[in-house]
Image (spheres, grey):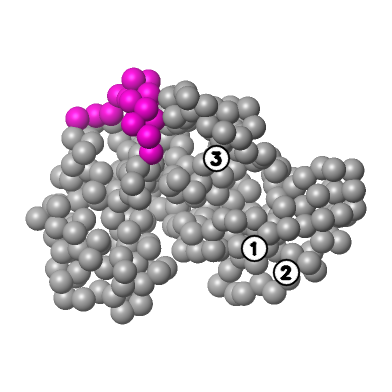
């Protein structure tokens, strides 16, 4: 990966040309640590979100394609993509509002609807990013047709190899990971492991409530995989409201044993956090792997 050096101020003339309007104000928006995110206001009062400063040339095109993949389902609102290049992505600004009483009921129902959009293969036609980490979505024929094969090789093993490169693969982590490898087919055995469209990085920082009280998804890491992976991610840092899970289950009940499988799906994200943020996630990685001893 190469570092791109065009910052948001340098890109403003390009953005003005793209939207055909002069930008009057821009201010930083809170959000993730991956990109510089700014709210733009034009002279006629229109608002846009500009993200710059990615660590790889494919990050913003990948985000744009993921948002478009979610949008065509018509199930849940995502920001419209106005433009994307290797240097920036320009998005619709979604004004936020207060969550109504039925917000999480609605959110759970819409996610269940999204998860009914199927594909014939696991993965995606291009690789993208989970945070700042490359997410490998393009697999071999056998990986693309078998969920446990895909999830182990393109998710867990990829992160484990990065942990080795980063110096986090202690003897204990290696031993526990070898146990996961020996049991992964049995752990992930489930009758409904079919490829469905996933947000891919569904934690509390990647959804919002719009001005009309509707749930919206942002910052996806899309691919086609087992729907339980999205739900496991929602529970990783405290979980969503109980109504969310109840509503989802009433629309699209989960297969027996989902609680047992949840830990291995969380493991992918915790290993990614270990690789991104360091040893603060080491013990949690071990704890998740010990669930399958």
Identify the residue at horizontal 55%, vertical 63% (top origin): 34
Q: Which residue is mark 3?
A: 208
Q: CA distance from mark 3 to mark 1?
A: 19 Å
Q: Which residue is mark 1?
A: 36
Q: Position of residue 232 (x, y in %)?
A: 32, 43
Q: Earlier in the sequence, mark 2 or mark 1?
A: 2
Check residue 215 in the rendering and tell me which mark sits there, or answer none. none
Q: Position of residue 17 (x, y in %)?
A: 88, 54
Q: Which residue is mark 2?
A: 7
For mark 1, give the secondary structure.
strand
Compared to residue 218, the image places residue 62 above or below, namely: below
Stretch in magenta: 240-256
Using the image as rendered, state which of residue 258 and residue 211 is in the foreground.
Answer: 211
Q: Is residue 117 left or right of residue 286?
A: right
Q: Earlier in the sequence, mark 2 or mark 3?
A: 2
How busy is the neighbourhood of tag 1: few (under 14 within 10 Å), some, or many (20 plus)?
A: some
Identify the residue at horizontal 89%, vertical 43% (top origin): 44
């Amino acid at each position: 990966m190469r570092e791109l050096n065009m910052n948001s101020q340098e890109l403003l003339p390009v953005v003005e040309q793209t939207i055909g309007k002069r930008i009057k104000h821009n201010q930083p928006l809170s959000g993730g640590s991956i990109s510089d995110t700014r709210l733009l206001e034009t002279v006629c009062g229109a608002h846009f979100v500009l993200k710059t400063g990615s660590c790889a040339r494919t990050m913003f095109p990948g985000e744009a394609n993921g948002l478009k993949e979610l949008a065509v389902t018509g199930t849940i609102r995502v920001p419209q993509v106005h433009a994307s290049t290797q240097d920036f992505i320009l998005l619709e600004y979604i004004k936020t509002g207060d969550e109504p009483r039925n917000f999480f009921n609605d959110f759970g129902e819409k996610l269940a609807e999204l998860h009914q959009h199927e594909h014939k293969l696991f993965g995606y036609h291009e690789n993208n990013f989970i945070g700042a980490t490359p997410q490998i979505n393009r697999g071999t024929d056998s990986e693309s047709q078998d969920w446990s094969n895909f999830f182990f090789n393109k998710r867990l093993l990829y992160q484990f190899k990065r942990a080795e490169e980063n110096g986090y693969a202690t003897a204990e982590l290696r031993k526990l990971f070898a146990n996961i490898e020996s049991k992964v087919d049995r752990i992930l055995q489930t009758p409904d492991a079919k490829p469905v469209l996933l947000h891919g990085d569904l934690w509390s920082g990647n959804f919002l409530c719009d001005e009309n009280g509707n749930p919206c998804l942002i910052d996806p890491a899309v691919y086609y995989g087992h729907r339980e992976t999205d739900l496991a991610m929602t529970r990783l840092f405290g979980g969503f409201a109980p109504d969310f899970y109840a509503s989802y289950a009433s629309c699209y009940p989960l297969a027996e044993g989902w609680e047992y499988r949840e830990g291995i799906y969380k493991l992918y994200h915790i290993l990614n956090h270990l690789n991104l943020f360091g040893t603060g996630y080491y013990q949690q990685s071990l704890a998740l792997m010990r669930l399958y001893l």
